[in-house]
Image (cartoon, rainbow, N blue to C red):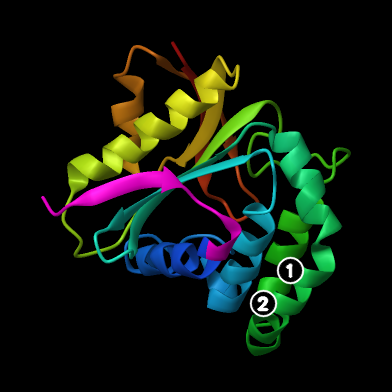
């Protein structure tokens, strides 16, 4: 395995983290998030990396290139409010893709509306701590290093007083979905259907 070091991401890492996330679209491209283009993804991470409740652990090689990251929020409800406060920045970043693909507008509106507490459409769990993305650049060595990213993230969350973390997995990702149910510290606590018809499981991980 190539030499890799781990550290917390900082706001200036937005471009590299965007590049890393963008590279997963050939393996998983469901949903509106990646459909809105790299410019939107960059704007999203600029907002997220400036959020004090966000924890993003990144792995970089000896050349300083970020090859993977794992993200999560200590407060999903606060994160939703932060994203709503930056709706103009995110909206402008998405507008080019929406002009090219007007069919995306409904999905974007539904996703935006779901951030409001009064909305009954659920995309992600909006309470407590939440685990978000785990990405590793295609072609980069180090599958063990990818798993270590999650371990470091959860360890940091626990140090900050978090005892349970929620996360979602689409049921079509059958291998990953079933793997979670075999882990003692992880419990499937519910399932729901997204507006686009995808079925998603809600999991809880107990941190020790």
Residue name at image x 45 percent, y 27 percent? 154
Q: Position of residue 192 (x, y in %)?
A: 59, 35
Residue 90: numbered disc: 1
For the residue pair 3 and 82, the one nearer the viewer reads as 3
Q: Position of residue 80 (x, y in %)?
A: 75, 45
Please tell me whether mark 1 sits on a helix, a strand or a loop: helix
Mark 1 vs mark 2, CA separation in Å: 18 Å
Q: Is residue 11 visible?
A: yes
Nearer the viewer's eye, disc 1 or disc 2?
1
Residue 171: numbered disc: none
For marks 1 and 2, the one nearer the N-term is: 1
Asked if the residue at tag 2 contacts the one at tag 1, i.e. Cβ–Cβ closer than 8 Å, the answer is: no
Q: Residue furthest left?
A: 1
Please tell me whether mark 2 sits on a helix, a strand or a loop: loop
Magenta highlight range: 1-12
State the residue position of label 2. 103
Left or right, 135 with reference to 197: left
For the residue pair 114 and 1, the one nearer the viewer reads as 1
Q: Residues within 10 Å of mark 1 (few under 14, many from 20)?
A: many
Magenta residue check for 184: no
């Amino acid at each position: 395995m190539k030499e890799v070091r781990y550290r917390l991401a900082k706001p200036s890492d937005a471009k590299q983290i965007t590049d890393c996330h963008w590279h997963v679209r050939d393996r998983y491209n469901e949903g509106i998030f990646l459909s809105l283009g790299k410019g939107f993804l960059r704007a999203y991470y600029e907002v997220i990396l400036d959020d004090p409740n966000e924890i993003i652990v990144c792995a970089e090689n000896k050349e300083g290139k970020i090859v993977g990251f794992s993200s999560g929020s200590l407060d999903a409800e606060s994160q939703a409010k932060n994203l709503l406060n930056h709706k103009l920045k995110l909206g402008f970043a998405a507008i080019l893709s929406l002009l090219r693909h007007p069919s995306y507008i409904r999905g974007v509106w539904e996703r935006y509306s779901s951030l409001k507490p009064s909305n009954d459409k659920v995309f992600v769990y909006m309470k407590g701590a939440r685990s978000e993305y785990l990405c590793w650049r295609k072609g980069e060595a180090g599958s063990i290093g990818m798993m270590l990213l999650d371990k470091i993230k959860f360890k940091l969350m626990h140090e900050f007083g978090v005892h349970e973390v929620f996360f979602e997995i689409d049921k079509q990702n059958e291998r990953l979905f079933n793997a979670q149910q075999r882990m003692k510290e992880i419990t499937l606590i519910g399932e729901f259907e997204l507006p686009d018809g995808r079925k998603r499981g809600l999991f809880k991980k107990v941190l020790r």
